[in-house]
Image (cartoon, rainbow, N blue to C red):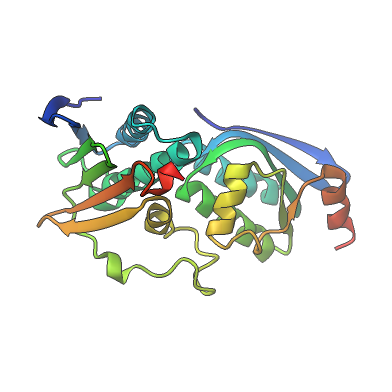
Amino acid sequence: MRHSEDVQLAGPQVSRITYTLESSLESVNRLEQTAEDLAKKAGIDEDELFRVGMAVREAAINAVLHGNAYDPAKRVNASFETSDDAFTIRIADQGPGLDPDTLPDPLAPENLLRGSGRGIFLIRSFMDEVHFRQLHPGTEITLIKRLGPAGTAGL
Amino acid sequence: MSMKLSTRQVDDVTILDLSGRITLGEGSVQLREAIKDLLAHGSRKILLNLGDVNYIDSSGIGELVSAYTTVRNQGGDLKLLNLTKKVHDLLQITKLYTVFDVKEDEATAVSSFATA
């Protein structure tokens, strides 16, 4: 798998790593693993590690599968930023764009038995903040886990 | 990383012992194929033993739901056995815990099919 890594210090207490990845399942697994490794370094506990890893996995699946549709010409851009008070992950695809407001509620009785459509719901359940940004083309999702007493990671 | 799957028969119940991860590109397709195969061979009482499944993503959850609806649509029943805490929590969050018949003891699970 090709990827590029750029470690930079954005400030005295902020570290940031960026990746450009192919639209493949390998990239999904790579981003999930990276998220877990960095979350662990940031002091996030075992239960929260699982949630952060899974949220990143789901966001990466959305980018690779639903956004870029495994298109070898399209890339997934990801960044991981650790500061004193937050672990922030951004994942962007180059797909047709996703409007999160149009997604059906997976908890609605008529949707409970659907075989898909739970990814963004799980991301929102597992992270403290989730934001979407339209890139024209593509979608960027930002996942934030608060660190310290203010966030769930510190509870 | 990948999922392992084996099948055994207890009375007229087919038990699928799964271990590892049920995720996109790993266990999901294997599970779908296994259910299809069992139905084709006449199994209608299927018990998924998830005791050694330590990770499942939205694709895996979707596959469990699809397995459930597929088996039910063919007049059979599919139940879950031995959920790990992670899988249990995920089914709670997604409100699927009450959809599935979840058992903690294999003998009880097997006999629950017979009396159904």
Residue A42 is left or right of residue A6, and the answer is right
Q: Quadrant of residue A154?
A: top left
Q: Is residue A1 left or right of residue A39?
A: left
User: Is A119 situated above or below B2?
Assistant: below
Residue at 39% in and 29% down: A40
Q: Position of residue A8 (x, y in %)?
A: 12, 27
- Which residue is at the far front? A149
**Residue B34 shows in this picture:** yes
Q: Quadrant of the N terminus of chain A?
A: top left
Does residue B43 appear in this view? no
- Which of the 4 image quarters holds residue B98? bottom right
Q: Is residue B26 left or right of residue B68?
A: left
Q: Position of residue B2 (x, y in %)?
A: 51, 29
Q: Residue at x 59, y 60 (%)?
A: B96
Query: Against A100, is B16 above or below?
Result: above
Task: Report whether A151 appears left or right of B67.
Answer: left
